Image: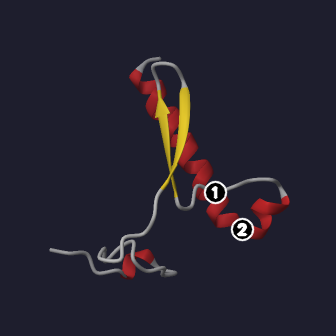
Amino acid sequence: MARGSIAGLIGSLQANEAIKLALGDAHCREHGLEPLRGKLWLFDAADASTRRLAVSRRADCPVCSRVVSDPTSIPLPT
């Protein structure tokens, strides 16, 4: 698989996840969709395999330790 096509594939999958989040949990459940919230999706282009790993929030992280409606309001460390 060429590098350009891999970037296009990953971009399409990221856009799909963003659409799922924008539609909301109720819509996703109604249509059998599951956003990757709390998961890391890994893609191996060598054999086109995928894996999902569960990830958790770190209490000491200023970004992932809290849930906010506007992610741009989170102060980033300098």
- Mark 2 and mark 1 lie on one chain; the one further toward the N terminus is 2
Tell me what residue is drawn at x 59 percent, y 53 percent. 17
The residue under label 2 is 25
Outermost residue toward the left?
78
Q: Amino acid at mark 1?
A: Pro
The answer to which image quadrant residue 36 occupies is bottom right
SS under mark 2: helix
How crowded is the residue under tag 2: few (<14 C-alpha within 10 Å), some, or many (20+)?
A: few
Residue located at (70% from left, 65% from top): 23
**Tags 2 and 1 in contact by the CB under 8 Å rule?**
yes
Q: Position of residue 64 (x, y in %)?
A: 39, 71
Q: CA distance from mark 2 to mark 1?
A: 8 Å
On the picture, is 9 further left or further right than 33?
left
Vertical arrangement, residue 36 with respect to residue 60, above or below: above
What residue did someone put label 1 on? 35
Relative height, residue 63 to residue 35 (above, below): below
Q: Nearer the viewer, residue 27 or 34?
A: 34
Left or right of 63 on screen, residue 68: right
Q: Indicate whether 21 appears above or below 31.
A: below
Q: Residue drawn 42% across and 26% down?
A: 4
In the rendered image, which quarter is residue 26 located in? bottom right
Image label count: 2
Mark 2: which amino acid? Asp
In percent of width and height, residue 72 lies at: 38, 76
Q: In the image, which disc is placed on residue 67? A: none
Residue 12, percent from left and from top: 56, 41
Please state which of residues 15 and 31 is positioned toward the viewer in this rendering.
Answer: 31
Q: Is residue 76 left or right of residue 69?
A: left
